[in-house]
Image (spheres, grey):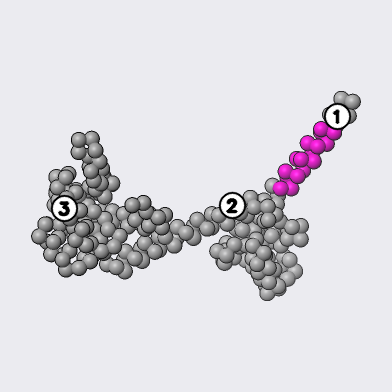
């Protein structure tokens, strides 16, 4: 069954966390997502193959949630297929039946606390999403036509981009800090300053991007005008 994009990210996060935990416990991860083939046909996939601190080879199954009876059977069967010992990294057992079966089949289980795994996954997903949105905001600032800087904003952006503090920028513009903050809030409402730009350094960085865009647009306009003059001159000379 195909995983949704969110499920894929959650699985990838669980895999990275599990690998890190195994390494911290002295395991050496040799291979990830090992395909098992019989007579030229894929019959299974082992999440990881690791060499344990005891010198044993382990077939590792990684579970984003809790380990149930079906998961125990899968871990045991996959380990048999590659001639290794079965090991599962998970949040714990789904029920007592899974725990008893794991003990009976010799499936080693490394339990991660719910707090650790959930927090780590959520944190990673949150950071990834925030980073993605921040990159998109930067791209919009640079490329979206609606972010074209208006002439009345140039002086303000120059001061914000160049001054180390909001107090210095306000003094340069002949404003008090409250007035400058209100003008920046207006730019934020219009979408020029992204939501994530809360600190003065972040606002300065956005101002520097907008200033660079304004300068580039002015340069391109100047080059366009020069090219048009050259074309006009060429037409006159050719006439």
**Magenta stretch: residue 208 in it?**
no
Give the left or right position of residue 7, taking residue 40 as reference. right
Depicted 209 relative to depicted 117: above or below: above
Q: Say which residue label 3 marks.
A: 76
Disc on the earlier residue, 3 or 1: 3
- Disc number placed over residue 235 in the picture, else none: 1
Secondary structure of the residue carrying numbered label 1: helix
- Disc number placed over residue 139 in the picture, else none: 2
Task: State if disc 2 and disc 3 touch (CB < 8 Å).
Answer: no
Viewer-side residue, 126 vs 105? 105
Q: Of tags 3 and 1, which is closer to the observer?
A: 3
Q: Position of residue 110 (x, y in %)?
A: 21, 60
| Magenta region, residue range | 217-233
* Picture residue at 36% right of the left edge, 62% below the top: 121
Secondary structure of the residue carrying numbered label 3: helix
Quarter holding the C terminus? top right
Q: Position of residue 207 (x, y in %)?
A: 64, 58
Q: CA distance from mark 3 to mark 1?
A: 83 Å
Q: Position of residue 236 (x, y in %)?
A: 88, 29
């Amino acid at each position: 069954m195909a995983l949704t994009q969110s499920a894929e990210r959650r699985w990838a996060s669980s895999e990275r966390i599990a690998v890190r935990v195994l390494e911290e416990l002295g395991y050496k991860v040799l291979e990830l997502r090992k395909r098992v083939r019989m007579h030229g046909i894929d019959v299974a996939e082992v999440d990881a193959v690791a060499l344990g601190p005891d010198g044993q080879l382990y077939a590792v199954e990684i579970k984003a949630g809790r380990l149930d009876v079906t998961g125990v059977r899968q871990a045991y069967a996959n380990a048999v297929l590659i001639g290794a010992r079965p090991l599962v990294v998970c949040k714990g057992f789904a029920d007592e039946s899974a725990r008893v079966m794991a003990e009976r089949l010799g499936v080693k289980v490394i339990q991660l606390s719910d707090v650790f795994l959930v927090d780590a996954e959520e944190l990673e997903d949150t950071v990834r999403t925030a980073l993605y949105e921040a990159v998109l905001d930067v791209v919009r600032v640079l490329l979206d036509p609606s972010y074209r800087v208006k002439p009345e904003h140039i002086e303000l952006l120059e001061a914000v981009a160049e001054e180390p503090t909001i107090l210095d920028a306000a003094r340069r513009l002949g404003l008090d800090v409250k007035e400058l903050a209100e003008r920046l809030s207006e730019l934020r409402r219009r979408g020029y300053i992204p939501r994530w730009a809360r600190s003065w350094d972040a606002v300065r960085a956005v101002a520097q991007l907008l200033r660079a865009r304004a300068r580039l647009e002015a340069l391109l306009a100047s080059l366009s005008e020069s090219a048009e003059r050259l074309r006009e001159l060429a037409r006159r000379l050719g006439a």
